[in-house]
Image (cartoon, grey):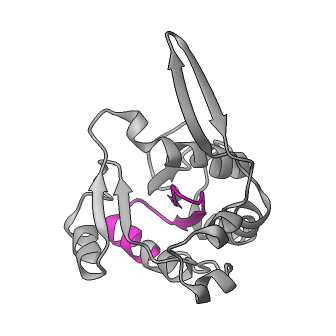
Amino acid sequence: MDLVAHCGEVNRGSYVHSVVLTDIASGWTEAALIAFREGTLVVETLDRIRAGLPFALRALDVDNGSEFVNNRLIKYCLGHGIELTRSRPYRKNDQAWIEQKNGAVVRKLLGYRRFEGLAAARAITRLYGASRLFVNFFQPSFKLAAKQRDGAKVAKRYHPPQTACERLLQAEGIPRPPRASCAKSPPTSVR
């Protein structure tokens, strides 16, 4: 899970943020908006996203921001049986999967402009609801199968491209009801 700031070129004042979750195994990605960066809103948004996932959220890996590393999120995860881990300080590669989705989904949709206010938040929330279907059901992606190093040369081999939903349908550990309805409604409200 990560937070993407929509502050434009000026990182001050009030602006909206995207909360982004990506499942490493399937590539399933969810994005939701919060009106400002605050731990309680992150937990409320996580709860709404979790209710719409087609699988159980068993673990959550976050960066070291105060919006994630706080008593509210720790208490929430303990209360719902979610293992909470965090990345190592100053190690950008610890969050490689989510950073890739931040660029491929959030920044591709919204760019780097500044967005402020509830009107912008509502419009982006509707956009995320529609893009959720495209990203998870219709946009195939590659998944690394093997990597072999020969000196400085690295050879990578990938599985055939699949959508996140296709990967979930093939997964062994996913119970039948969520498999049958891979699409639940996206979170709709903005906090």
Residue 9: x and y in percent read 56, 36
Looking at the rendered structure, the number of numbered marks drawn on it comes to 0
Quarter holding residue 78: bottom left
- Is residue 185 visible in the rendered image? The answer is no
Residue 93: x and y in percent read 42, 35
Depicted 175 relative to depicted 136: above or below: below
Residue positioned 25% across, 81% down in the render: 79
- Is residue 101 visible in the rendered image? The answer is yes
Residue positioned 71% across, 46% down in the render: 108
Residue positioned 71% across, 49% down in the render: 141
Depicted 86 relative to depicted 132: above or below: above
Q: Nearer the viewer, residue 82 or 187?
A: 82
**Seen from this angle, which residue lies furthest top?**
151
Q: Nearer the viewer, residue 107 or 122?
A: 107
Does the magenta portion include 28? yes
Residue 24: x and y in percent read 51, 55
Question: Could you tell whether 175 is left or right of 92 in the image?
Answer: right
Residue positioned 25% across, 57% down in the render: 69
**The N terminus - image quarter:** bottom left
Question: Could you tell whether 139 is left or right of 95 in the image?
Answer: right
Depicted 145 relative to depicted 187: above or below: above
**Seen from this angle, which residue lies furthest bottom?**
177
Residue 94: x and y in percent read 38, 40
Q: Nearer the viewer, residue 112 or 94?
A: 94
Question: Could you tell whether 107 is left or right of 191 in the image?
Answer: right
Q: What's the magenta region?
A: 23-45
Does the magenta portion include 37? yes
